[in-house]
């Protein structure tokens, strides 16, 4: 007599949210303005503006851009703002900072706008492993967003999850 194997996870109300599913497609570019500074350290406004005017901004079409300076130069805020005005018609998103900061900003916006109504009064697992660069803060933000509506929140996989929260 064979016993039928029943997938209890598939039959349960358990819902999984995988932040990797929301990873925005598109190339990421780090734009280092060090190359536009005199000796990599001094911003000379006239020369800086000339470099910006002659730069090919079209190469950033539909890309995500992080602008920063890899040297220890002191860069005035207007310099990043000026570059952003040139990137605005082309880039999907522009941030001042590292590529990691870019990913964090993207995920912050995604999670803020995420419809989580399907998770209401359900046990939820936030999948932990990802092949894409999901920033650590994204896990905190999705947890905070789920707490008011989910029955419970766990982290990991259905077979080995870590309980984080249960409505009491």
Image (spheres, helix red, strand yellow):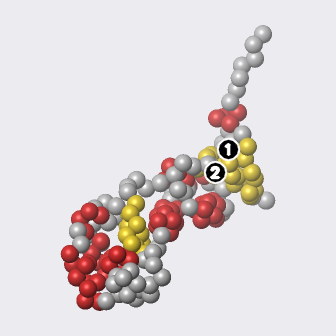
Please tell me which residue lies in front, 94 or 152: 94
Which image quadrant: the C terminus? Answer: bottom right
- At horizontal 74% and vertical 51% (from top left) the residue drawn is 162
Q: Is residue 85 left or right of residue 164?
A: left
Q: Residue furthest front?
A: 39
The residue that mark 2 highlights is 128
Q: Is residue 120 left or right of residue 39?
A: right
Label 1 Cα crowd, 10 Å radius (few <14 / some 14-19 / many 20+) = some
Element type where label 2 sits in the image: loop
- At horizontal 72% and vertical 39% (from top left) the residue drawn is 159
Residue 45, x across and y down, in percent:
29, 89
Which image quadrant: the N terminus? Answer: top right
Residue 78 visible here: no
The CA distance from mark 2 to mark 1 is: 7 Å
Residue 59, x across and y down, in percent:
26, 62
Please tell me which residue lies in front, 149 or 130: 130
**CB-based contact (under 8 Å), mark 2 and mark 1:** yes
Q: Does 151 sit above or below residue 88? A: above
Residue 48, x across and y down, in percent:
29, 84
Q: Does 22 sit above or below residue 93? A: above
The residue that mark 1 highlights is 157
Residue 132, x across and y down, in percent:
51, 52
Q: Is residue 47 left or right of residue 2?
A: left
């Amino acid at each position: 007599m064979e016993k039928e194997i029943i997938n209890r996870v598939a039959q349960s109300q358990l819902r999984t949210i995988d932040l990797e599913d929301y990873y925005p497609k598109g190339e990421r570019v780090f734009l280092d303005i060090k190359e536009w500074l005199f000796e990599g350290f001094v911003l000379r406004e006239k020369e800086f503006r000339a470099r910006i005017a002659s730069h090919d901004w079209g190469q950033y079409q539909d890309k995500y851009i992080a602008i920063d300076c890899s040297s220890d130069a002191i860069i005035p805020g207007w310099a990043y703002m000026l570059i952003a005005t040139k990137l605005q018609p082309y880039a999907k998103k522009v941030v001042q900072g590292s590529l990691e900061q870019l990913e964090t900003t993207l995920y912050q916006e995604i999670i803020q706008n995420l419809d989580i109504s399907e998770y209401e009064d359900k046990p939820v697992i936030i999948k932990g492993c990802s092949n894409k660069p999901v920033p650590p803060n994204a896990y905190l933000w999705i947890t905070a967003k789920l707490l008011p509506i989910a029955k419970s929140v766990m982290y990991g996989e259905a077979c080995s999850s870590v309980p984080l929260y249960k409505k009491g």
